[in-house]
Amino acid sequence: MRQLTLENDLRDVVSRLERQVELATAQGRTDINLALEDAFIPILKAAYQLPNLINLNRKRKNYPGIDLGDDHDRVAFQVTSTTTLDKVKSTVQQFMDRAYYNSFDELYVLTLTPKQSSYSQKAIDALLTDQFAFNCKKHVIDLGDVLREVSALRVTAQERILQEFQHILGEVDAFNSFSAEAVETPTTITSNLQAIKLPEAVYVAELAIEDKMVVARAKAELGYGGRSRNRRSVVKMALLLESVETDAWVYYDGRLFAFEDMEQTGVAAVVDTGSIERLDVVDLASSPEADNVNVLKQLLVAQTQERLKARGVRLHPKDRFFFFSPSAEGEKERKEAWVGKKKSIRRVYKLVQQKKDPSKVAHHQHLSFDLSFISIGDTWYGQIVPSWYYSFNGFRRSNWHEDLLSKQKRIEHNSTVRDQVRFIAYFLASLSDGFAEVSDIRYQSLIELESIQGIEAEALMLEVAETSDDGNEDSEEVEA
């Protein structure tokens, strides 16, 4: 009886979920899949036995063509509300063009509404090579297919998945409710784009260090025990050996770039001082060379990192997102005052203790955000994407990070995320307090988009997304 009731409940919740997604897409909100990527992780983990499945967009920004992946079992998923053959072809084409088959052996296209009765295998085969196989009957799946995999699990596992589906249904209900709210014309939309004023100049100089000598000194004086991973690491060690701790620089093609005068910051200790040259920032900002623009973008990150470091916000060295740390060692909670519509207090860090043994730490929760830079016309913006980071010691990623993040995202609504963006923008704007130097980035107001029923706003945000995709791909070519 328990099994029968469970099967009926699962079929019911999946059927309702499909109808709600269809409603959202009928309203033109095909971005609903973006809101649900994290929510499906625990279900797909259990159904397809993929314990290391993660959201790839958190591992690498804007992972085009695929959303979720398990690089241990080499399986990837694209989650979409579009069921057409063109969508499948587009996904497979991107997978092949970007050579994702080097990382993943299987690709599933998961449609959130019932898939078509058939797809042209011939059309897909035309996109494939001997390096990768995609079978439409096997690899295009919908929620009904997922449900069949779930039915083979133990009853207790099915009960947990039922709860996950119910959470997702609640998210979709909230998504549709928010989308259907009456909106007056014109509409003012607060974006996640923060206008910035660029510094006036960029300093560039030829690097002047002997790598082997630097590494040898670092082993003797800094206790460095490994081999240098890349040239940037050697430059960092060279600066530390000269007691220079700034991170506000970028290394590229044998040269260092910085917004601040190298003679004043100490960076001159590792460069040929006779080669120091002052450039107008517009020389990089308007350059037709992608590498020059990417150097500027990475300098903006580096300068921001240096200012945030003094305010207890760290840059994750591998994944390159910012996260709030405790203000002092042993601090169990950190709160920051800010002004939105009114004066408020926001918690940005919390130490969470184990329920069974409160003397032990379960994890640390940090407010985090990705920060990238784009230009639209002659204007530059910082693009803020808030999230949460879960560590086991205040810095290193917890093994439970993905699960904890998924649970947190399920209880957040659009208004929550908007408030997070506003807070982070306020915090960034406050970095200039006390700094009058022309070498500083000035974070200004969030951009408000006024449009007729959001049409112009959506067009601009699409342009932003496309610009971000291009910029992120290019930035991999420049070593920061």
Image (cartoon, rainbow, N blue to C red):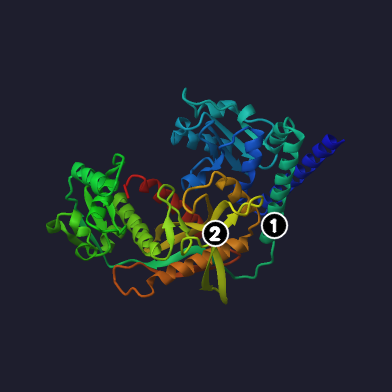
- At a point 84% along the width and 35% down the height, the residue shown is 4
Horizontal side, residue 271 vs residue 132: left or right: left
Q: Quadrant of residue 364?
A: bottom right
Which percent across, then down, holds residue 97?
44, 35
Q: Secondary structure at mark 1?
A: helix
- At a point 51% along the width and 62% down the height, the residue shown is 331
Q: Residues within 10 Å of mark 2 (few under 14, many from 20)?
A: some
- At a point 55% along the width and 56% down the height, the residue shown is 365
Q: Amino acid at mark 2?
A: Glu
Task: Reply above or below: 418 against 228.
Answer: below
- Single out the mark in the foreground, 1 or 2: 1
Q: Nearer the viewer, residue 146 or 313?
A: 313
Q: Quadrant of residue 307?
A: bottom left
Which percent across, then down, holds residue 242?
22, 56
Residue furthest to the bottom? 342
- Mark 2, residue position: 458
Can residue 131 be seen?
A: yes
- Mark 1, residue position: 174
Q: Amino acid at mark 1?
A: Ala
Q: Secondary structure at mark 2?
A: helix
Q: Nearer the viewer, residue 66 or 262?
A: 262
- At a point 57% along the width and 66% down the height, the residue shown is 419
Q: CA distance from mark 1 to mark 2?
A: 20 Å
